[in-house]
Image (spheres, rainbow, N blue to C red):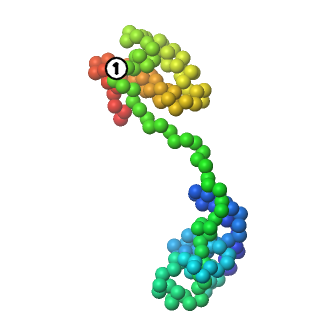
Amino acid sequence: MFPRSDRGPCRGTKDKLPCGKDVWWTRTAAGVEVPINLAPHPDGNTAVWRDVHGVLRSQRITPDLLALVPHAKRMTRHVETCTGKPRVQALPPRPPKTSPPAGRLYELLGVARTATQDDIKRAYRRLARHLHPDVNPDPKVRIRFQEIGEAYHVLSDPGLRQQYDLTGRPPRAR
């Protein structure tokens, strides 16, 4: 029942890509794996030692720790010296969801207040083809696309449309 090899390549962090350098993989008291640079460092902030089972352990240095574990070596965490490139965000952040202003739902779709369900559906589909984020990546167009989606949601439902016609405000989402 021996532990796996303690030496391995850097795997990177949530903020950095892996740099590929060899590091010691140690375990903390909580069981978390922590990469440590291979060479001891006199100004290191981490104590590293092998426990009775042969597992490489590490702990942040406190004044009383080195007295408890005299055979521990001062080393630095690899995270502090890792040269990996920063990770890039996969997608830009989405703009906040906005509700269309009160009294504008018919104007957003370009239909009259007396429009039938088919007219509303045709107007929404026509606008959606031109304003979809896959077709037009402009952030302002994305917000407009969300607004026409909200307008279609309200005007295509007879109950919500009647409530909107009476109050002039879109019903709140539940």
Q: Position of residue 23 (x, y in %)?
A: 67, 71
Up the image or down, 126 lies above or below 70; here it is: above
Tag 1: amino acid: Gly
Label total for image: 1
Q: Quadrant of residue 58?
A: bottom right
Could you say which is closer to the camera, residue 169 or residue 120? 169
Quarter of the picture holding the N terminus: bottom right
Q: Secondary structure at mark 1?
A: loop
Name the one closer to the observer, 112 or 37: 37
Quadrant for residue 33, please give it.
bottom right
Q: Which quadrant holds residue 56?
A: bottom right
Which class describes the residues within 10 Å of circle 1: few (<14), some (14-19), or many (20+)?
some
Residue at 39% x, 30% y: name it. 99
Residue 57 visible to the viewer: no
Q: Badge 1 is on which residue?
A: 103
Residue 113: in sight, yes or no? yes
Q: Is residue 160 left or right of residue 135?
A: left
140 left or right, relative to 100: right
Place of residue 132 in the rendered image (x, y in percent of width and height, measured from the top left)? 56, 26
Q: Quadrant of the C terminus?
A: top left
Q: Is residue 23 left or right of residue 80?
A: right
Q: Which residue is painted at 55% across and 41% down in the image?
A: 92
Identified at 55% across, 77% down, the residue is 45
Camera-side residue of 7 and 47: 47
Give residue 106's position: percent from left, percent from top.
40, 16
